[in-house]
Each structure stands twice: as C-alpha cells, then as structure tokens.
Amino acid sequence: ISIYWAQHGTFIKLWSMKAGGSRLRGALAAVAFALVGVASGPAHADPKVTELRIGEHPDMTRFVIDVSSPVTYKIFMLPDPYRVVIDLPEVTWAVPPGASDSGRGLIKGYRTGLFAPGTWRIVLDVQAPVRVKKAFLLDPREGHQYRFVLDLEQVTREAFLQDLRAAPKEAPRAVPAPPVAPKVSDKRIVALDPGHGGVDPGARGRDGVYEKDITLATAKELKRQLEATGRYQVVLTRGRDVFLRLRERIAIARAAGAEVFISLHADTIADPHIRGLSVYTLSENASDQEAEALASKENKSDIIAGMDLNSESPEVANILIDLAQRETMNHSVNLAKFAVSELSHEVKLLNRSHRFAGFAVLKAPDVPSILVELGYLSHRKEDKLLQSPAYRKRLSKALVKAVDDYFSWSQTLTKS
Ligand code: ZN
C-alpha cells in the first residue's frame, strides 16, 4: 500500500494493491478535489507543527509530528535512494532545531520545507526498503495537540518495488509562470537564480546557516543593485523559501525573456581551510574532478526534494550539449570571465576561479548562463562573511560590473 490520504482523524485507505487502475484514478481525482476543498477552506492561519519525534520499536519505526490543527496528508515512496515523502498543506514549521535531527531506527534523517505554494513536504531518508504499516491523525488529548503518526516497517526490495509499480504515478508538476510582466522597456532582462529552497536546503554552514538562505539574500541584494542602475529588469526564479526544480528555474528565465542567467550557490567541503569564490559554466567534460563532483552534488536537488527522477524524460536527464548551445556557451564563457575579473577586485577567489562542469541548471539552450559558488560555508571566516549584508553588497557590486561588461561586449559583437 503506497498512498494514504486522511483528514481530521479519519484514516482513509485510498488504494490497495488489489485495486484496478481505473478505480484508482477515480479515487485519486476525488481526493484531489477533497484536498482543494480543505486547503482553500476558512483557515486563517496555517497549521503549526511544533514537535517531531522518531521512535524505534522492535518491528517498526514511528514518526510523529504535533500539529495545531487537522491536516490532510499524502504519503508515497521513492527508490534509489529509499525515501518516504509526506506532503501536507502549507504549514508553519516551528519544530525547535535539533529535534531528532540525526534520525533513529529505519529513519536516517529528514528534510522539510515548502515544496510548492500550498504544499509543505517532509522527506524521510530511510535505511532500507520500507512500507507504511499505519498512518493516522490523532485528536488532541493528554496535553498533546493533533498528532500525525506514521509507522514504517522494513520490507524486502522486491516487495518495495512491487508496491511502487502498483502505486499511481505522481502528476507532473506544472511550471510556474514567471513572476514578471513581459518586457515593456528597452531594459536588459537578467534572471537571478537563488540556488535550492524549501525542502532542499542546500549546504549547511558551521553554525547551521543554510545555503538556500544565503543565495536568496544575495540574489535580492544583486537585484536591488542591478535595478538601481536603471538599465536592468531582474527576474528572480524564486523570491521566497520554496523549492523549484532545476528545469523550472530555466523555464522561468526563458519565459521572462532573460538575456543572461546567473545561478547563485555556496558550498561546503571537508577541508575547513579551503575558501574562495568560483564561477562555473556548462561543459560536457568537467574541468577537473572537484568541478564534476560539485555538479553532481548540485544536480541532486530534485532527489533531495523527493522527486522521482525515474519518470524524467531522457533529454532532461542527459547533459549532452547540442549545436544550438555552442553559441550560447561562448557567451556564457565570456560572462564568466567578466565575473571572475570584476569579483577578483572585491573578494577572495578560489584557485582556477573559472571552472566547467555538467550543471543541469545551466542547460538553457539560448540563455547565456553561469553558476557562481559564492564561497565555502565550511570555512569559519567565509561562513561569517556570506552572512553579512555588507559582504553581499560588495559581491553584488562586482557582479553588476560584470553584467555591464558583458552587455557592452555583446553589443560590440552585434555592431561588427
Ligand atoms: Zn548549491
């Protein structure tokens, strides 16, 4: 049994492995409708999740959250790596940091955050193939609020895969509309892409700061400075703490008519002495092993957020670059060179500051794109600097100059 949906303490087993396909689709449609009804109801404040507990029992692992009002939920499993995904309506997450962070029993750890407007997601990483033994919502009693309880038991990989095959496929996620009006002026359009977000926190700094928050703060400052010149109109792929798929980031930039795309990230590394900013452009062949490892880490965003990549179309999954991208790549390389040159006056760079690798988010065929790794959250000083608004101002100032340099260069190309 792979999908459960419940509301207000009533546990509805939607679907069992014996159910036929058409009956299943009918049930799902009805439930989707019911969910919309609940989500758009008279709720004034989002339900608040205040506690989280993981309990280890001989035959199962119990996952519990306390929530201030009844919530609907949807549970499904993903393979390779084994994950359990719990989708709730939008909630306010008020679980104190440190609560069951390390996991227990079958649960190795979890991530949580906004998956899409209206959907809050919890992704459990599990040690082994599992099955939902029970899932239910308890009414408040004995000093507790509402409690959502999920019991997981271990099964064989064969049983897990069999459950998956029988489970309904998740509906493809619609690409959000770009949050800008179409171009009305002669301003250049710049897309800024704050890496990670929502259920995908990205790297985590020494004192717990998340990459997703650093990238968003930097993007907002850079947007402010670019727009202050009067020459640019800036679209942010996200303006809040929400998850976006890598391909959605590209789609937003393209739909907005972006002429350049700058993805912002920060990294961590085992060696605490390594620091410095670096700039990446797309290439089939990574410039070095570190760049390749970094790209494969950044490309895991969708897996971290509980997406099923098995349902991905192959042209998205592979990174082969077609001819149409070659011209764009020349532009990307120049944008990266301007960025490295301007940034070198303001901040410390990593050695070989311009590197190449197969970053999925740089794959827009027609938008020159770079990815800036702003620095290392594993370096004591750089971690502090990246959290400082003054440092982000300096970074942004250099990036504005780089964008200026780039557009004056590309204009000379079209004139000659
Ligand atoms: Zn990143």
Image (cartoon, grey):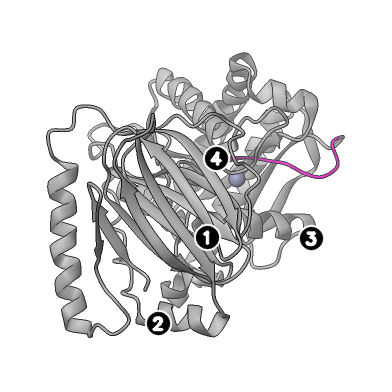
Q: Which residue is mark 1?
A: 303
Amino acid carrying label 3: it is Gln
Q: Which residue is mark 4?
A: 409
Q: Tell me the magenta residue range.
A: 263-272
Sequence-wise, which precedes: disc 4 or disc 1?
1
How far, Cα to Cα, is label 4 from label 2? 53 Å
Amino acid carrying label 1: it is Ile
Q: How busy is the neighbourhood of tag 2: few (under 14 within 10 Å), some, or many (20 plus)?
A: few
Q: Is residue 301 left or right of residue 49?
A: right
Q: Is residue 81 left or right of residue 344?
A: left
Depth check, mark 4 against mark 3: the one in front is 3
Which residue is the extreme one toward the front?
Answer: 142
Q: Residue at x 16, y 80 (%)?
A: 23
Q: How busy is the neighbourhood of tag 1: few (under 14 within 10 Å), some, or many (20 plus)?
A: some
Q: Which secondary structure lies at badge 4?
A: helix
The image position of residue 409, as x and y in percent, is 55, 40
The image position of residue 359, as x and y in percent, is 59, 57
| Cβ at disc 2 under 8 Å from ligand 1 | no
Sequence-wise, which precedes: disc 4 or disc 3?
3
Q: Is residue 41 visible?
A: yes
Q: Which residue is mark 2?
A: 165
The image position of residue 289, as x and y in percent, is 79, 60
Depth check, mark 1 against mark 3: the one in front is 1
Q: Quadrant of residue 235?
A: top left
Depth check, mark 4 against mark 1: the one in front is 1
Q: Nearer the viewer, residue 295 or 320?
A: 295
Q: Residue at x 35, y 76 (%)?
A: 167
Q: Which residue is mark 3?
A: 289
